[in-house]
Image: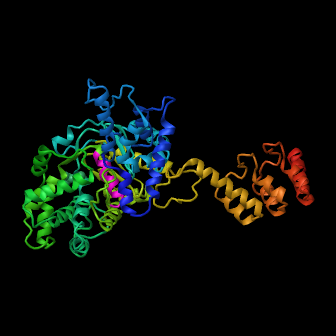
Amino acid sequence: MKNASNVIQGEKEESSDAEWNIDQFEDRLFEILSDPNGRVSVAKFKSMLAFSGLRDTDPRLKECMTNFENVLQLNQPDHDSKNTDYYGGLSVDKKTFKECIQDNIILISKSLKNDFIIPEWQNFKQEIDKIYRNCRNNTNGNVASYIPQLARYSPDFWGVSVCSVDGQRYSSGDTNVPFSLQSCSKPLTYCMVQSNDDNIERVHKYVGHEPSGRSFNEISLDYQKKPHNPMINSGAIIVSSLLKPELALPDRFDWTTKMLSKMTGGEYLSFNNAVFLSERETADRNFALAYYMRENKCFPEGTKLHEVLDFYFQLCSIEVTCESASVIAATLANGGICPMTGEKVFNSAAVRNTLSLMHSCGMYDYSGEFAFRVGLPAKSGVSGTVLLVVPNIMGICLWSPPLDMWGNSCRGIQFCQELVNVYNFHNYDNLKHTEKKMDPTRLRIDTLSQDVVNILFGAFNGDVSALRRYYLLGLDMNIADYDGRTALHVAAAEGQEQAVRFLLEMCNVNVNTKDRWGFTPLEEAERFEHPEVAKLLISSMKKMEHPETD
Ligand code: GLN
């Protein structure tokens, strides 16, 4: 087995610190997990990884899982090796444990130190599930019927898959059923065109960046006689003509699917020939668009129109599942690096451009409203898919075939809206202080303890302007530390008269609150000899007893 600590050592030649830390981490991990006989249950170890959101099929854990499997083979040669969940009470000693985990120790240590982008993955999963269930009751919309392959999908299909930028995974519902990418291929090909640096500027010689305000397949061009943007059919057809035109069509298709497969981290990707044939059969509008654009000299010179259209239909007919498409979205969320493999698929400038256009143009004619309500880059497709990107945090794929009047998945839209009602994911949500919304990238306990420290520190220093700020931000001014000490206790003990006045008169805090030793703020003021403060507190207590004297 390759030693991960060597890898680290290799990066940091002389220093043995990193090696020592990893070794120490492995020892500590063993201590935490081992039973009184000095053995670690493999099932228990795996469930700890799962708790943080990792799957044991994660390619980044492959060596570790294979090592455990090999140990199992040696111990119980009769077990069913296909059943990867079977560990039949297998436990290993310290030496074996360390040998088995060392190849993937960096990821394992991150997982067990709770060092992922979403530290409380279990709570996050529960919220996702809640929203998933709410949306399941939404029976609005109609399944696309322009080709039989789409019309045949049951309106009941509903799947949600999440993949964080650290490769934490969660799926609910029909997340392994294949469906075609359709318009969700548009941002992906746009991003691919730009994977060649020279093309970053070039592509916009042929296609604009403005929302069209028209339906996705309308025959119209902007004032420069270019398609409005790459997220509508005309723009996507142009982008298809810019994608590896030097290659013959079969090689072009191969190249594209290889890129897509890098985005899915090797997860499900296929091609639905029946969808392709139907798309081509019912493509009068797309042919009309292409001819109109050719008449207006929109294509680069030498473009073979029929070949480009075929390529465009093929791109629409590529199949994914909710699971694999969530990894695609996560690759976009992660600046072009696939979280499941660590492979760099795109440069970050291409991804940024793609996300910008998804944000302004990704949801057909609903794009403006979506940007207003949800504030996240997303792209929908007529198969009922929504690729939703929470930049730097996660990618989400939503799939449910019934569409609304704009062509967006009804359940998908509802999910996006409910998600940003719960979490501060909207682009313009305040990231520091959101009273109602949660920030899943922070441990809730950290947020709470930070609030306590801030308020008590403000009271200690008599910093009324700081206290005013916390009050205006909606923080609970009665909040107490682990000793039951509130801002009022601290301000009273320190003789901070203005702070005490502000807390009593503006924030209406509880004047009779007791700390863990039973002291009230008044007793604190008296104990530390602040008679003016004591007076204030007494009068506030009197007012509480006889409010009518006010
Ligand atoms: N194949 C469809 C078309 O080109 C894709 C459109 C869509 O998903 N809105 O018309």
Q: What colour-coding does the image apply? A: rainbow
368, 343: nearer the viewer: 343
Instruction: Check if residue 499 falls in the magenta segment.
Output: no
- Residue found 10% across the figure and 56% down from its top: 310
Q: Position of residue 477 (x, y in %)?
A: 71, 53
Q: Position of residue 429 (x, y in %)?
A: 51, 59
- Left/right placement of residue 372 relative to residue 238 reads right
**Magenta highlight range:** 324-335
- Residue found 28% across the figure and 30% down from its top: 73
Residue furthest to the top in view is 78
Q: Is residue 183 visible?
A: no
324 in relation to 301, above or below: above
- Residue found 19% across the figure and 65% down from its top: 239
Question: Residue 505, located in which quarter of the rendered image?
Answer: bottom right
- Left/right placement of residue 40 relative to residue 488 reads left
For the image, the number of numbered tags is: 0
Quarter of the image that includes the N terminus: top left
398 in relation to 306, above or below: above
- Left/right placement of residue 330 relative to residue 260 reads right
Q: Position of residue 59 (x, y in %)?
A: 30, 46
Question: Residue 352, located in which quarter of the rendered image?
Answer: bottom left
232, 20: nearer the viewer: 20
- Left/right placement of residue 517 relative to residue 385 reads right
Q: Is residue 530 visible?
A: yes
**Main SS of the magenta segment?**
helix
Question: Residue 235, located in which quarter of the rendered image?
Answer: bottom left
326, 235: nearer the viewer: 326
- Residue found 23% across the figure and 49% down from its top: 181
112, 273: nearer the viewer: 112
Q: Position of residue 445 (x, y in %)?
A: 59, 47
